[in-house]
């Protein structure tokens, strides 16, 4: 009998898996993936055509297949779940936490979603899912899971342990035991350690901690991420307007939120208009890149128009053309530095953060120092190294000073304005600020030259 190789994420195993799929060798597929990490299997199946990946999921046990499906990115999830029969998908969802199940179902149309829910075996799971579907998916209600462990304050330790055993069947990870009153209102939490170390007849009311941080169902996911980061929480309970405990959010859900935010900011900073990945089609990636590239081209054409407008001055002092790249590059670099710092500050909001006016003043003072140093350095190099006249060196140095001030102002004020308008301020760190500073930098450069050189 041929020995089954242990699962290993490699090109060799991928080729063996393809051969097993072609030969419909279900034994190899199941045994070789036994004990494998779900994320590794998802990464492996991502390399296969959708129909082959779907075949593997159908061969595996429903519980493992459900865990693997959760690990796929949203685009791949959509391809797979829309290719599945509704009964197949329902069988997998029966093995998911309610929050993960809702993330999957939200990708389907209303009718398809209701059909899948109707095929669920666990009626309690159906009720949890229907409850969560009422909330905005970017809110605490949309993020939370209905699976958690709670204890009434009037229970004894032995009653609580029995309830933990009963409730834990549907809870994969236990971080805290939430304590509630007779009306299900959140009172606090009690650790497993306190429960184990307390005597059997001790009341939960005597050992629970009432300093539990909670969030309302309508709180935005960005705020929740900041709270959990600040207080280093592994989970956080969710309450309704009556302070009734309705769910919990775990750290793995928040890590997904943080990752999505980072990807959005990076794509905004690099000028991508849509959420795209390397594996997407050529057309979709090109479509996402084109808008800001077109803006950059238009900005370049406008810059050429500014240079053309000052053509007479350039003909009189040809040397001015040599320093155009220096001015444009410096303005872009200063603008990006300034906007990046402001974007970081806006992303990590605090009650102690500076006001917009304080940020502006601080940015202006930083630019003043940088402008004096850079302008003086350029003046010295132009006169001493390039042997130009002193007045020409003063012109380039002063232009550099003005460009640094202007670029710093734009880089500081633009993300603040965008944030007030509800637009992702990370846009200010990308092509937007670079193009704007190129145009304004050229205008300032030639303006200073006209004044000092009498062009």
Image (spheres, helix red, strand yellow):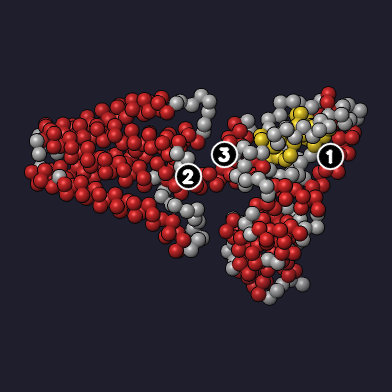
N-terminal-most mark, 1 or 2: 1
- 197 with respect to 441 (left or right): right
- 192 with respect to 398 (left or right): right
N-terminal-most mark, 2 or 3: 3
Given this view, does label 3 or label 1 mark the residue nearer the observer?
3
Tag 1 secondary structure: helix
Callout 1 environment at 10 Å: few (<14), some (14 to 19), or many (20+)?
some
Q: Which mark is residue 106?
A: none
**At x 44% / y 52%, what residue is drawn?**
273
Depth check: give the residue in front, 162 or 380.
162
Q: Is residue 110 above or below residue 199?
A: below
Q: Quadrant of residue 234?
A: top right
| Image quarter in which the N terminus is found | bottom right
Depth check: give the residue in front, 168 or 307.
307
Q: Quadrant of residue 248?
A: top right
The spot of residue 328 in percent (x, y) is: 26, 43
Tag 3 secondary structure: helix
| Image quarter in which the C terminus is found | top left
- 240 with respect to 351 (left or right): right
The spot of residue 57 in percent (x, y) is: 69, 64
Q: Which mark is residue 265?
A: 2
What residue is shown with label 3? 222
Q: Is residue 54 above or below residue 68?
A: below
**At x 64% / y 40%, what residue is drawn?**
140
The spot of residue 270 in percent (x, y) is: 41, 48
What residue is shown with label 1? 164
Q: Quadrant of residue 84?
A: bottom right
Given this view, does label 2 or label 3 mark the residue nearer the observer?
3
N-terminal-most mark, 3 or 1: 1
Using the rendered image of the protein, determine whether residue 6 is visible from the camera's viewpoint.
no
Callout 3 environment at 10 Å: few (<14), some (14 to 19), or many (20+)?
some
Residue extending furthest toward the bottom: 23
């Amino acid at each position: 009998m041929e020995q089954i190789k242990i699962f290993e994420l490699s090109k060799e195993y991928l080729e063996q898996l393809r051969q097993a799929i072609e030969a419909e060798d279900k034994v190899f597929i199941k045994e070789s993936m036994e004990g494998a990490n779900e994320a590794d299997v998802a990464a492996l199946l991502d390399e296969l055509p959708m129909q082959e990946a779907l075949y593997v999921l159908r061969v595996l046990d429903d519980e493992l297949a459900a865990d693997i499906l959760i690990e796929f990115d949203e685009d791949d999830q959509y391809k797979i779940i829309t290719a599945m029969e509704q009964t197949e998908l329902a069988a997998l969802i029966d093995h998911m936490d309610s929050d993960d199940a809702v993330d999957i179902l939200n990708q389907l149309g209303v009718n398809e979603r209701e059909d899948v829910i109707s095929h669920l075996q666990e009626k309690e799971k159906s009720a949890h899912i229907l409850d969560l579907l009422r909330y905005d998916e970017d809110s605490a209600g949309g993020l939370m899971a209905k699976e958690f462990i709670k204890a009434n304050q009037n229970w004894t330790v032995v009653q609580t342990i029995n309830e933990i055993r009963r409730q834990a069947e549907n809870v994969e990870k236990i971080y805290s035991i939430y304590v509630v009153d007779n009306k299900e209102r959140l009172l606090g939490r009690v650790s497993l350690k306190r429960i184990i170390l307390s005597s059997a007849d001790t009341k939960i009311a005597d050992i629970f901690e009432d300093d539990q941080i909670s969030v309302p169902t309508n709180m935005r996911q960005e705020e929740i991420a900041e709270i959990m980061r600040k207080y280093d929480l592994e989970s956080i309970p969710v309450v309704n307007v009556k302070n009734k405990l309705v769910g919990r959010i775990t750290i793995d859900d928040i890590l997904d939120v943080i990752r999505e935010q980072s990807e959005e900011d990076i794509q905004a900073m690099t000028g991508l208009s849509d959420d795209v990945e390397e594996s997407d089609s050529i057309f979709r990636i090109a479509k996402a890149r084109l808008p800001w590239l077109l803006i950059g081209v238009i900005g370049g054409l406008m810059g050429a128009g500014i240079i053309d407008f000052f053509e007479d001055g350039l003909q009189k002092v040809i040397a001015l053309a040599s320093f155009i790249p220096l001015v444009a590059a410096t303005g872009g670099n200063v603008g990006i530095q300034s906007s990046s710092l402001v974007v970081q500050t806006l992303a990590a909001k605090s009650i102690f953060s500076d006001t917009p006016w304080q940020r502006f003043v601080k940015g202006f003072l930083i630019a003043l120092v940088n402008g004096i140093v850079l302008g003086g350095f350029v003046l010295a190099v132009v006169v001493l190294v390039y042997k130009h006249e002193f007045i020409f060196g003063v012109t380039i140095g002063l232009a550099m000073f003005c460009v640094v001030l202007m670029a710093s102002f734009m880089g500081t004020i633009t993300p603040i304005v965008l944030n007030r308008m509800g637009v992702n301020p990370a846009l200010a760190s990308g092509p937007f600020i670079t193009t704007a500073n190129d145009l304004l930098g050229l205008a300032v450069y030639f303006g200073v030259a006209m004044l000092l050189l009498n062009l």
